[in-house]
Every structure is written in C-alpha cells, then in structure tokens.
Amino acid sequence: MVQTATQQSEPPSKQRRRLFDEEELDLSTTRENEGHPLDIPPTPLPKIQMLVIGIVLFSDPLTSTILFPFIYFMIKDFQITDDETEIGRYAGWITSVFFICQFFTAIPWGRFSDRHGRRPVMLIGLIGNSISTCLFGLSKNLWWAVGSRALCGIVNGNSGVARSMVTEITDETNRAAAFSIFGFCWGIGLIAGKEQRKNLCKGGFLCKPAEHFPSLFGNVQFLKDFPYFLPCLVSSIGSFGGYLLGYCCLKETNPDVIRRQKRANPDERTALLADDATARDEDDEPTTKNSSKIRQITKASYAVIVGYA
C-alpha cells in the first residue's frame, strides 16, 4: 500500500522513467540467460567468393579511371582537332559515356540477377569488362573509343550485385568485416587507375611503350600502331583472372535461384514430385511479392542515385 501510494504521488514523468528502468532490467536479464549475440564467434568468410567480389570491386574504379592519364594524348592522336577546348569536350564525351551507361544498366542488371542469379551477372561483368577495355585500347578514332567505353559501362553494372552477394553469404557476425573490403578495393582501384609514372600498373606509365621502352617494345609494330593498348591490357588482366576464378569456383548465392536449381536436379526430382503443386504455389507467391518490392526499391534507388549525382 505504501509503494502504491508512493507511485501515485510521483509525477507521471518519474513513473515512466521507473517503468523504463524495470523493462531494461528484465531485458538485460533475459539476454544474460539466453546468450547475447555478441558472444557468438564470427563465422569464417568464404575466401574464394570474397576474392572474386574483391576483384569486381577493384576492376570497376580501375576501368573507369585507367584512361585519365592518356585520354588527352589519345584524342590528339586521332587528329580530329588541334583546339584545346574541343579536345577537352571530346575527352568529356569518352569519359562520361561509361558512367551514363552504367547508370542506366545497374538496376536492370540487379533485376536480372534476382531472376537468373548473381553468378551469371558477375561473370558477364568480368569478361565484358576485360573485352571492352581491350577494345578501347585499339581505338583509332573517336567513335570507336566512345563505343567501347559505352560497352564497358553497359556490362559494368555489377557492383550492386556484388553487394547483394556479400549480404547473402554473410551473417550478423561477419557482415561488417565483409563490407569493409568495399572501400579498400575501391580505393586501390582508383589509385591504380589515376597515378602516373610511379608503378607499372598505372595507365600513364604504360602508354606508348615503344617510345618509353625502346629496348623492349621498339620493334613491336602492333604497339606502335596502338600505343594505348598496353595499359588497357594490363587493367583487363585482373578482370579476366577474376572471370576464370569465378567460372571455376564462384557459387550461386540467390536463394530463389538455388531453390529452382535444386528442384530441377534429376536426383531430387522424385522426392519433390509429391510437393510439386505446393512448391509452385510457394514460388508464385514470393515472385509476386518480390516484384512489388523490386518496383519500390527501383523508384527509391533512382531517387538516391539522382540526388547523389
């Protein structure tokens, strides 16, 4: 009775504070009894999967910036103009077309990965990045350069898919560590693409190798005809290596695609015949829900991308 009278005499704010403290005490006791998630040891990261994802994250900024050291000289060698202003405008075309195409294809690639799997999108991006970068190194005129950079941007919309893969192959114990590689790989790719004449992976140091290294490449007519091919080739080697590694070792992570693949497996077909009708109903329902979610995410993503730009 005394406690009740005391509570009634207290102001409402103190009563709410007392109730909040009691709930916190009950919650902490429950966590101690059940085991707090922070006490769970982190799950080991899948090394091969993370390596392929890291190569994708590295090749994206490297591909987008590898041309910066030599784009001015490339356009000048096209001999379309001697005006510095015009050269700058053409350089802007070649540089921006990559990002424009990547902007318009990133979300379609994400939808494609939701339907057909993350693995095909990652492999297409890696091999497409390697081929289109080499094609850019073979540019002899403006339109070839613009077209090859556009192709590179079209097939390079897989960085968002890489983030989806990281989410699907990790849990709460190791997700933060996995996502920490994004900034690291992006920064390394930017450094490798922009810096000039300090490392053999830099675009400015490897352009015109017949002039810079006459003892090695002075008699190679191909490099004289295409003086900007070597830096593009070097930047594409990483993507091609990632493609080979991913083709052999990369596993699918999309749970819906994995479920469909298991259902289509002849070894498990007999066991699933009895549940075929139920499985179809279950498949149709998530598809409808996922479609509506994708539409919502797409609108939000476009708004965020436009705001960020």
Image (tube, grey):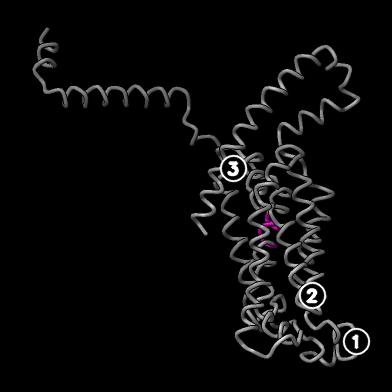
The residue tagged 1 is: 221
Name the quadrant of the N terminus.
Answer: top left
Q: Earlier in the sequence, mark 1 or mark 2?
A: 2
What segment carries the magenta color?
Answer: 54-59
- Which type of secondary structure does the marked residue at label 3 adopt? helix
Q: Pinpoint residue 259: horizontal percent, then vertical percent.
A: 76, 28
Disc 2 + disc 3, Cβ < 8 Å = no
Quick one: label 2, few (<14), some, or many (20+) residues within 10 Å? Answer: many
Instruction: Compare residues 38 and 23 and report the one nearer the observer.
Output: 23
Q: Earlier in the sequence, mark 3 or mark 1?
A: 1
Q: Is residue 10 magenta?
A: no
Cα distance between the residues tagged 3 and 1: 49 Å
Residue 213, placed above or below residue 139 = below
- Which type of secondary structure does the marked residue at label 2 adopt? helix
Q: Earlier in the sequence, mark 2 or mark 3?
A: 2
The residue tagged 3 is: 298
Q: Which residue is painted at 88% across and 21% down in the image?
A: 269
Q: Amino acid at mark 2?
A: Gly
Disc 1 + disc 2, Cβ < 8 Å = no
The residue tagged 2 is: 137
